[in-house]
Amino acid sequence: MKKILSFCVALCALAIAPTANAADMPIRGPQYKYAPPPLAVFNWSGFYVGAHVGYGFSDDIDGFLGGLQAGYNWQLSHNVVFGLEADISGTDMNGTPGGSPVHIDYLGTARARIGYAWDRTMLYGTGGFAFARTGVLGVHDNETGWALGAGLEWAYSNAWTLKAEYMYHDLGANFDVSTVKIGANYRFSSY
């Protein structure tokens, strides 16, 4: 019995001894962890091309549209983005304004854009020149005027963006059309 008791005392002494020695070790300085480098803020500058689909309407005309766009953006400061964009859409817009059957063959714009970006999301306003080719009773004519609108664009990768846009087109001669479009752009200048 004495041997078992002696063995238990020796075992307890060995278990306690390293703890006592650890208390006498010098104190090390604080442990610093280095923060990862900050993520780069998305840069909207550069050339892009894309495609869109949408719907056009006015009091007496409506129909679907689809087409292409191209543009260039300059990020002027951390958040302000200025750009130029041109688009053209083929349409199946038909109606009877003034009692005459009207068809819009295509609708396009050349516009300036100014936006405010929150990293990968940009809210923008846009305005500029608008044009269309219309057909009234089989006679085709080119219409010109102006366009004004707004949109929201989101970069879901460094090269691809998605956008939603509303635009009002005043083509003169009491002829106006509103459009709503969704589209995607491919950016050639990704960071």
Image (spheres, rainbow, N blue to C red):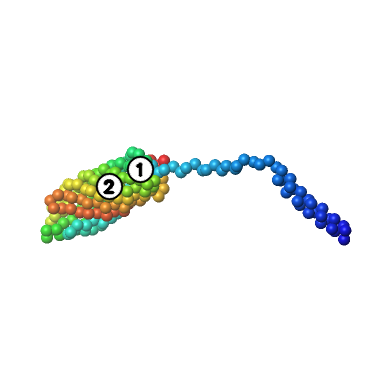
**Nearer to me, 120 or 160:** 120
User: How far apart in space, not on screen, are marks 2 and 1 (Cα)?
Assistant: 14 Å
Q: Name the residue under label 1.
A: 79
Q: What residue type is labelled 1?
A: Asn
Specify few, some or many for label 1: CA neighbours under 10 Å numbering under 14, 14-19, or 20 or more.
some
Query: For the point 30% across and 50% down, which residue is it?
Result: 151
Q: Which residue in the rendered view is the most extreme toward the right?
A: 2
Q: Is mark 1 on a helix, strand or loop?
A: loop
**Nearer to me, 65 or 163:** 163
Which quadrant holds residue 112? top left
Query: For the point 15% across and 59% down, which residue is it?
Result: 96
- Quarter of the C terminus within the rendering: top left
| Tag nearer the camera, 2 or 1 | 1
Up/down of 18 relative to 61, above or below: above
Up/down of 58 relative to 131, above or below: below
Residue 29 rendering spot, x and y as whole percentages:
62, 40
Query: For the point 38% across and 42% down, which residue is it?
Result: 43
Q: Which mark is residue 125?
A: 2
Q: How many labels does the image show?
A: 2
Can residue 173 be seen by looking at this rendering?
yes
Q: Which amino acid does label 2 sit on?
A: Gly
Residue 9 rendering spot, x and y as whole percentages:
81, 55
Residue 171 rendering spot, x and y as whole percentages:
17, 49
Which numbered disc, 2 or 1, marks the residue that appears first in the sequence?
Answer: 1
Q: Residue 190 carries which label?
A: none
> Left or right: where does residue 49 sit relative to residue 145?
right
Q: Is mark 2 on a helix, strand or loop?
A: strand
**Nearer to me, 8 or 141:** 8
Up/down of 39 relative to 62, above or below: above
Residue 85 rendering spot, x and y as whole percentages:
28, 44
